[in-house]
């Protein structure tokens, strides 16, 4: 088993990664002792994994709250539904929540945990690749508002992240590919050697080779943990994790949440960012090619949606959370393995890039 720690002083917590972790009761027991346990999931994931989780919870009595499945339900209505069910169950401050599912379940459960009776602990058991390498780590919790994604939320860290890579065996291929976009992102922004490892091991990853998967997930979590420990609230380096997200969020919002998967929009966004870097001579054409080639192995979108141009992008990007002092901020690669935050993209360059 690989274990990493997100170093945040008294709020530090472990991330454990291994196949079949959902059969190791000892991982959860320190957190659930003398606690009332409530698992939050959705029907899809609960059908697959709630029994398994129930087995390791053993004698511990627990309740299960199901939320509807889909990005369109990561909203205040579902937040209220889950809070309502907790109150009906008589849950109190001695309760611990376990988020069992993808990023939607994790983000919403985390925000419920941050808010319920002014904050109760929670554990992340992510079951999609995207949630395992990204959303379960780092304490960003949120729900969407009709006017913007993740517009309501809190920084609130889990007590532990338990990653059972075996859960990926039931994940649809398209969801797996979307998670790979975030894995590739870590190589581009932070770690050339990891990017090269991904190039060399792409077939193994496509075949879901257990060792290759465990390494890709562990290295991604390690990089995220390192960055979060340096900048928990995203006042500096953490913004680099948003490579491709300024363009990507605009794509998701314009197409309607859930039509393009988050990772798919990020893939197309990372290519736009690479092209912008190339125009600024921060990236060689051959390096953009390597990014495109790696993303294409996983059959991720390599271009923005047809018909979506400058005006549509700008409409959404002006509301991006990264806008500072009226300036849209972009994350752009500077060579492979390094990236910077910049507002220095001229309107003419953006017009050329997006039209
Ligand atoms: N908090 C963060 O730092 C952060 C970072 C990145 C993304 N996000 C958020 O994550 C969300 C996307 O998460 P996601 O990609 O995991 O999507 P998701 O949670 O919607 O899961 C995708 C689908 O897979 C199903 N599923 C989950 N695990 C499964 C399994 N093991 N087998 C079969 N089906 C399974 C789900 O029920 C769902 O239908 C977005 O809301 C995004 O904003 C948050």
Image (tube, rainbow, N blue to C red):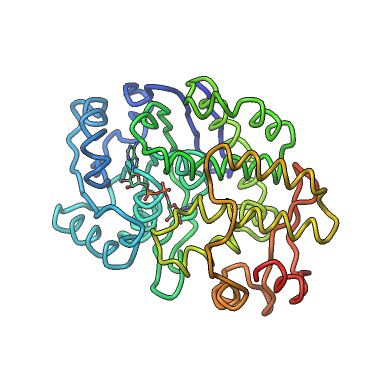
Residue shown at 40%/29% (left/top)?
164
Q: How many labels were placed on the picture?
A: 0
Residue shown at 48%/41% (left/top)?
177
Q: Is residue 272 left or right of residue 208?
A: right
41 vs 265: above or below:
above
Which percent across, then down, holds residue 294? 63, 38
Q: Is residue 278 left or right of residue 265?
A: right
Which percent across, then down, holds residue 126? 40, 39
- The part of the image, by quadrant, that contains residue 349 is bottom right
- The part of the image, by quadrant, that contains residue 235 is bottom right
* Foreground residue among 165 and 267: 267
Residue shown at 33%/28% (left/top)?
29
Q: Furthest residue to the front?
A: 306
Q: Quadrant of the C terminus?
A: bottom right
Residue shown at 35%/23% (left/top)?
26
332 vs 181: above or below:
below
């Amino acid at each position: 088993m690989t274990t990493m720690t997100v170093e945040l002083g008294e709020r530090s917590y472990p991330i454990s990664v291994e196949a079949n972790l959902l059969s190791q009761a000892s991982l959860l027991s320190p957190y659930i002792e003398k606690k009332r346990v409530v698992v939050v999931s959705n029907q899809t994931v609960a059908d697959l994994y709630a029994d398994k989780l129930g087995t390791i919870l053993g004698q511990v009595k627990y309740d299960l709250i199901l939320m509807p499945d889909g990005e369109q339900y990561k909203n205040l209505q579902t937040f209220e539904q889950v809070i309502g069910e907790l109150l009906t169950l008589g849950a109190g401050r001695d309760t611990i929540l376990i988020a069992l599912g993808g990023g939607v379940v994790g983000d919403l459960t985390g925000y419920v945990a941050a808010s319920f009776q002014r904050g109760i602990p929670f554990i992340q058991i992510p079951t999609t690749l995207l949630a395992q390498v990204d959303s379960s780590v780092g304490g960003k919790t949120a729900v969407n508002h009709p006017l913007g994604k993740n517009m309501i939320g809190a920084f609130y860290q889990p007590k532990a992240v338990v990653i059972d890579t075996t859960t990926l065996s039931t994940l649809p291929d398209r969801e797996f590919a979307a998670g790979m976009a975030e894995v590739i992102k870590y190589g581009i922004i932070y770690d050339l050697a990891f990017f090269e490892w991904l190039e060399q091991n792409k077939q193994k990853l496509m075949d879901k080779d257990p060792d290759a998967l465990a390494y890709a997930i562990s290295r991604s979590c390690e990089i995220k943990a390192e960055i979060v420990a340096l900048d928990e609230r995203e006042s500096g380096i953490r913004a680099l994790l948003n490579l491709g997200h300024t363009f990507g969020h605009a794509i998701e919002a314009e197409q309607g949440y859930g039509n393009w998967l988050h990772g798919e929009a990020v893939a197309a966004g990372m290519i736009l960012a690479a092209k912008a870097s190339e125009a600024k001579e921060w990236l060689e054409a051959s390096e953009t090619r390597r990014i495109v080639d790696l993303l294409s192995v996983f059959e991720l979108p390599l271009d923005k949606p047809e018909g979506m141009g400058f005006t549509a992008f700008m409409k959404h990007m002006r509301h991006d959370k990264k806008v500072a002092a009226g300036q849209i901020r972009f994350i752009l690669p500077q060579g492979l393995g390094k990236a910077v935050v910049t507002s220095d993209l001229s309107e003419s360059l953006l017009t050329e890039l997006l039209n």
